[in-house]
Image (spheres, rainbow, N blue to C red):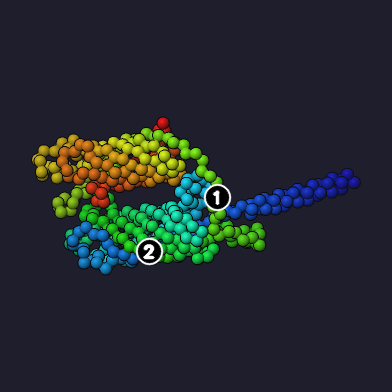
């Protein structure tokens, strides 16, 4: 009898536990689906491009005269404003993309494709229509490169793997809950940063148009496994919490980098030379996501030695060094910083490097004190000087 009572009590407790567990699950799901941003809101974007080349040389003018056509597919994650930087940048989106195009005579240039990461920052946002500033950075491949015997006309590209860069201004028109129509203008650039020469690079300016399809990744999972009547919102609900007061801070950083370059192929010298950069920076954060600053630059370019030896006869290590100063700006995106700087030279042997330079870089902050960075240093504006690979440390004051 005692055993039977014990069994009945055990069964009752088990059924109660199962009921409570089911009740907890129901309560959890009730709370979860009350969240308007449950799941992950994304979109797939398909864009067509067309336009013309901005070419500084002469050899390929006829090759590029018919312009270019390209196709892009992008997948983006949409932000909701949960984090301060997302609200400060008006709810941006970001993701990965694929590019393929016909940029001219394929025998000379090839049919390049590319893969990259991108970022859209909306502005002038309205209920059904807004605009976005976009940046994309990655790699392009499947290019036919310069060869003095088999492809002598291609003085723009001399490596099969090049940097892909795209800047755009895009209008986004909401057609329905599911679809957007996109249109705009953009600039695309291919370059290897003078790791191989010749390297005039390809600059393509044009227009684009396409379609976005929005979706929520949790939609099918919930319907199949939890609640067949649930309809997940396709687009996010933007959180309108006010921004906190800006914390104005100052930061000191030191950055060191190296690179590899070739001199102009017309020299007949097929050799690689090392480069180095050492940068001391001060920056002041003036908004939640932006800072401005200034700094000093030290440069070393081993390729200067060849030209100086011919011009002056005697070359020292000091002749290959330059000192400069710059002003700059940075946009802070969680752990990433987009760095832009413009500078001039304070000391150098002669004017071989021109009078001013740009630095465009992307920095990843490993922790509070350290970072890695890759960037492009230019010569007199748009001409690539070398790619900087490096890292450094920073200290908030």
Q: In x, y percent, where is residue 136? A: 38, 54
- Across the whole image, how many numbered discs are drawn on residues? 2
Q: Residue furthest top?
A: 397
Q: Residue at x 15, y 36 (%)?
A: 316
Q: Residues within 10 Å of mark 1 (few under 14, many from 20)?
A: some
In the displayed structure, does residue 173 sit left or right of residue 349? right
Residue 374 visible, this angle: no
Q: Residue at x 78, y 51 (%)?
A: 15
Between discs 2 and 1, the one toward the N terminus: 2
Residue 86 visible, this angle: yes
As helix, strand or loop, the secondary structure at mark 2 comes to strand
Q: Residue furthest right?
A: 1
Q: In x, y percent, where is residue 50? A: 33, 66
Q: Please tell me in which quadrant of the rendered image residue 286 appears.
A: top left
Q: In x, y percent, where is residue 361? A: 34, 46
Disc ID at residue 208 = 2
In the foreground, 178 or 69: 178
- Measured in 3D between alpha carbons, the distance from the residue under mark 2 to the one under mark 1, in whole angstroms, is 30 Å
Q: Please tell me in which quadrant of the rendered image residue 282 appears.
A: top left
In the foreground, 60 or 113: 60
């Amino acid at each position: 009898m005692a055993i039977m009572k014990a069994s009945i009590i055990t069964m009752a407790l088990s059924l109660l536990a199962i009921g409570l567990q089911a009740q907890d699950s129901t309560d959890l799901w009730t709370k979860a689906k009350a969240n308007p941003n449950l799941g992950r809101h994304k979109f797939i974007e398909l864009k067509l491009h067309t336009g013309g080349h901005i070419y500084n040389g002469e050899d390929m003018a006829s090759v590029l005269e018919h312009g270019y056509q390209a196709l892009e597919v992008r997948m983006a994650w949409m932000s909701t404003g949960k984090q301060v930087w997302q609200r400060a940048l008006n709810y941006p989106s970001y993701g990965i993309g694929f590019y393929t195009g016909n940029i001219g005579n394929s025998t000379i240039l090839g049919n390049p494709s590319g893969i990259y990461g991108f970022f859209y920052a909306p502005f002038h946002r309205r209920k059904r229509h807004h605009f976005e500033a976009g940046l994309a950075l990655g790699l392009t491949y499947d290019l036919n490169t310069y060869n003095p015997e088999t492809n002598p006309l291609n003085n723009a590209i001399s490596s099969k793997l090049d940097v892909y860069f795209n800047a755009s201004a895009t209008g986004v028109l909401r057609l329905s809950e599911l679809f957007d129509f996109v249109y705009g203008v953009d600039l695309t650039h291919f370059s290897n940063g003078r790791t191989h020469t010749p390297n005039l690079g390809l600059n393509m300016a044009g227009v684009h148009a396409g379609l976005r399809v929005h979706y929520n990744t949790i939609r099918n999972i919930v319907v199949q496994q939890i609640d067949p009547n649930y309809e997940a919102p396709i687009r996010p609900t933007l959180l309108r919490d006010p921004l906190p007061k800006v914390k104005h801070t100052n930061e000191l950083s030191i950055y060191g980098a190296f690179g590899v370059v070739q001199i102009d192929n017309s020299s007949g010298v097929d050799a690689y030379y090392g480069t180095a950069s050492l940068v001391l920076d001060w920056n002041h954060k003036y908004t939640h996501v932006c800072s401005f600053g200034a700094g000093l630059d030290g440069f070393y370019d081993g390729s200067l030695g060849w030209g100086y030896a011919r011009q002056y006869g005697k070359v020292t290590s000091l002749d290959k060094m330059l000192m400069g100063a710059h002003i700059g700006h940075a946009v802070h995106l969680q752990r990433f910083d987009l760095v832009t700087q413009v500078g001039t030279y304070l000391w150098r042997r002669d004017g071989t490097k021109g009078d001013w330079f740009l630095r465009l870089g992307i920095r990843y902050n490993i922790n509070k004190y350290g970072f890695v960075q890759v960037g492009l240093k230019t010569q007199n504006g748009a001409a690539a000087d070398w790619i900087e690979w490096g890292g450094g440390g920073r200290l908030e004051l």
